[in-house]
Image (tube, helix red, strand yellow):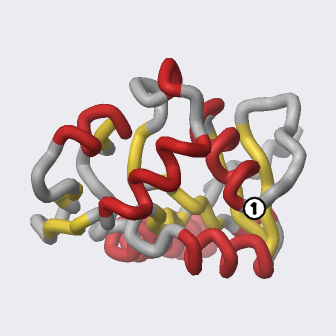
């Protein structure tokens, strides 16, 4: 009986996270493509169209060398997961980390991801409200017993 409950709990968790992430785009667009658009924005999986403010795109483009414009996908995803701690989030991608480091005036980490904490998350959302979105993650691990 307990095994059946664990499976249904995991299915419920997966379904809940999928619902929480319906706003996310099916496909993120590169900064270079968004800068060319008359009305820059992204279509979410739920068919909602999110406009990305041109002033935010300009700020991002000034924070990033031009050769990286074709590497930066927007919106920037602020990934929230229990694994990162309750007051923290992860930013992934070389170009994404570069932009966030400059916006937050932080040193750039050596790897292609960075963990940011609640005051930094709030600041990032304040500066780039239309160019950032939350993504909710959960790792569903199987306990391995020998």
Image check: 107 left or right of 91?
Answer: right
The quadrant in which the C terminus is found is top right
Q: In which quarter of the image is the N terminus?
A: bottom right
Residue 50 position in % (x across, y down): 23, 68
Q: Is residue 146 above or below residue 4?
A: above
Q: Which residue is drawn at 72% across and 50% down?
A: 102
Q: Circle 1 sits in a helix, a strand or a loop, which is it?
A: loop
Compared with 23, 90 (above or below) is above
Q: Name the residue under label 1.
A: 104
In the drawing, does residue 19 fall left or right of residue 77? left
Can residue 4 be seen in this snapshot? no
Q: Closest to the observer: 33 or 92?
A: 33
Label 1, residues with CA under 10 Å away: few <14, some 14-19, many ≥20: some
The x and y percentages for residue 80 are 63, 67
Q: Residue at x 76, y 72 (%)?
A: 120
Query: Which one is nearer the viewer's eye here, 141 or 138?
Result: 138
Query: Is residue 109 positioned above or below 104 on the image?
Result: above
Pick the residue in front: 114 or 64: 64
Q: In which quarter of the image is residue 51?
A: bottom left
Q: For the image shown, how many numbered marks are present on the structure? A: 1
Residue ID at (81%, 71%): 117
- Camera sees residue 29: yes
Tell me residue 37's x, y (percent): 15, 46
Q: Quadrant of residue 105?
A: bottom right
For the view shown, which residue lies furthest in the top direction? 67
18 or 143: nearer the eye?
18
Q: Return the x and y of residue 63 as percentages of the image width and height.
A: 60, 44
Q: Which residue is drawn at 37% across and 39% down?
A: 31
Within the image, what quadrant is residue 53 found in?
bottom left
């Amino acid at each position: 009986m307990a095994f059946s409950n664990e499976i249904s709990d995991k299915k419920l968790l997966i379904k809940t996270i999928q619902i929480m992430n319906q706003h996310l785009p099916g496909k993120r667009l590169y900064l270079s493509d968004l800068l060319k658009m008359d009305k820059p924005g992204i279509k979410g999986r739920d068919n909602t169209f999110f406009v990305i403010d041109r002033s935010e795109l300009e700020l991002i483009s000034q924070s990033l060398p031009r050769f990286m414009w074709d590497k930066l996908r927007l919106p920037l995803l602020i990934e929230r997961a229990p694994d990162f701690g309750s007051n923290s989030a992860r930013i992934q991608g070389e170009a994404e980390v570069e932009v966030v480091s400059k916006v937050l005036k932080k040193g750039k980490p050596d790897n292609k991801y960075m963990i940011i904490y609640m005051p930094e998350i709030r600041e990032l959302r304040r500066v780039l409200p239309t160019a950032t979105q939350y993504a909710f993650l959960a790792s569903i691990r199987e306990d391995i017993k020998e």
